[in-house]
Amino acid sequence: MDLGTDRKYLVLQGGGALGAYQAGAYEALHEAGVRPEWIAGISIGSINAAIIAGSPEKRRVDNLRRFWETATSGPTSLPFRTGPLIRKWLNEYSAAFSATSGVNGFYIPRSMMPWQYAAEPKAAISVYDTTPLIDTLNELVDFDRINHGAIRLSLGAVEVETGNFAYFDTHPCRLRKEPVPLTAHHVAASGALPPGFPPVEIDGKHYWDGGLVSNTPFQWVIDERNTREDICVFQVDLFSALGELPRDMSDVLAREKEIRFSSRTRLNTNEAARHERYEKALRRLLGKLPPDLANDPDVNYLKSQDDRGAVTAVHLIYARKPYETHSMDNEFSRLTMEEHWRAGYDDVVKTFASPQWKNRVIPNDGFVAIDYRRDHARPEGGLHEPAR
């Protein structure tokens, strides 16, 4: 398969148990020959990202599989056919089981006894203990490989005391001049969603799940890239901003969660597209200025800004099944995990088979979005520009 010459980046949204969709998507990307140079994640996306970046190339899919099989339980298929209503009941039972019993290798419920609060202060501000996740990450992830390897890794979190968005990044960035040596605690901090999970302390500061501020690290990658080469960003989202009108209260809760955690994916993409078009138009305009403006301070300032390459954004967005409810991100049955995994895999295969991908070109205006579910290819924002 011709993947093009642009640099490949991978962006992984948060979404709990839905994260198996990302694992399946990565398996298909890996089989197609995609080797991302930069992976950015939030919440469950950070866990998947750390496993990918912290594993030998040949073990990446296997280690993702180990994590998701550790975290899920139950049969991979049912001995009888079920309609949406029966399947909804089964999923709700599975989610309730996870809520009361915990998830293997991920989190366990606290006893909620008064004396536990005295022994463990975090028990007063969280329902679950995420120590098992730290142990699982240390078993599956080679953090020396992450901190000294070729893949850049960025994990989003929010500082509890200030409410500021933070990124733990293995490369220098605008927030820190020096890269951050990442550990299992940085990954856990990115996924510490309250009130279920406790904040994670790192260097005297406490962090919660980055999804509280923004559930996708797409904008971080667009803003922080420092290359004149063209890039292709595979954006794997777990919540869809598009959906149907709810029919009952269960649908209302599920739809509200999708809207809240989709982080305005397409709106952010539209804004990024406009910014890239302005940037490219400004570059073209600077080349047309008369010689007498060559030393103008404002012109020199504008010329000093980075001239960055074009962006291709590939949308891979999980489509919720009719029987999935608001508990979809806490439903850790093996059956549903396999379905999510297969959905991610199939969406990548369909994307690579779509005319949008096969006929893609690098646009003169600097930005194009690909989503195989759309009827035809067009740059986000509705603007049509000549391609190069």
Image (spheres, rainbow, N blue to C red):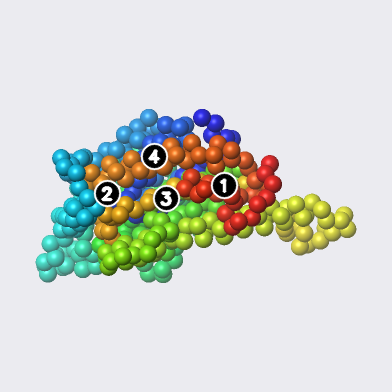
Do we see residue 306 in this rendering? no
Q: Closer to us: mark 2 or mark 4?
A: 4
Identify the secondary structure beneath mark 1.
loop
Quadrant occupied by the C terminus: top right
Look at mark 2 in the image and give the residue it sits on. 134
Q: Position of residue 18 (x, y in %)?
A: 32, 50
Name the residue nearer the viewer: 301 or 238: 238
Tell me which amino acid carries mark 1: Ala
Q: Is 70 displayed left or right of 156 in the figure?
A: left
**Mark 1 → mark 4, Cα distance in angstroms:** 19 Å
Do we see residue 45 in this rendering? yes
Look at mark 1 in the image and give the residue it sits on. 377
**Mark 1 → mark 2, Cα distance in angstroms:** 43 Å
x 62%, y 46%: residue = 310
Q: Position of residue 338 (x, y in %)?
A: 28, 41
- Residue 346, which numbered label? 4
**Mark 1 → mark 3, Cα distance in angstroms:** 16 Å
Is the Cβ of the residue at disc 2 closer than 8 Å to that at disc 4? no
Q: Is 86 displayed left or right of 302 in the figure?
A: left
State which tag comes first along the sequence, 1 or 2.
Answer: 2
Look at mark 3 in the image and give the residue it sits on. 317
Tell me which amino acid carries mark 3: Ile
Q: Position of residue 281 (x, y in %)?
A: 71, 55
Q: Is 125 displayed left or right of 164 in the figure?
A: left
**Mark 4 → mark 3, Cα distance in angstroms:** 12 Å
State which tag comes first along the sequence, 2 or 3.
Answer: 2
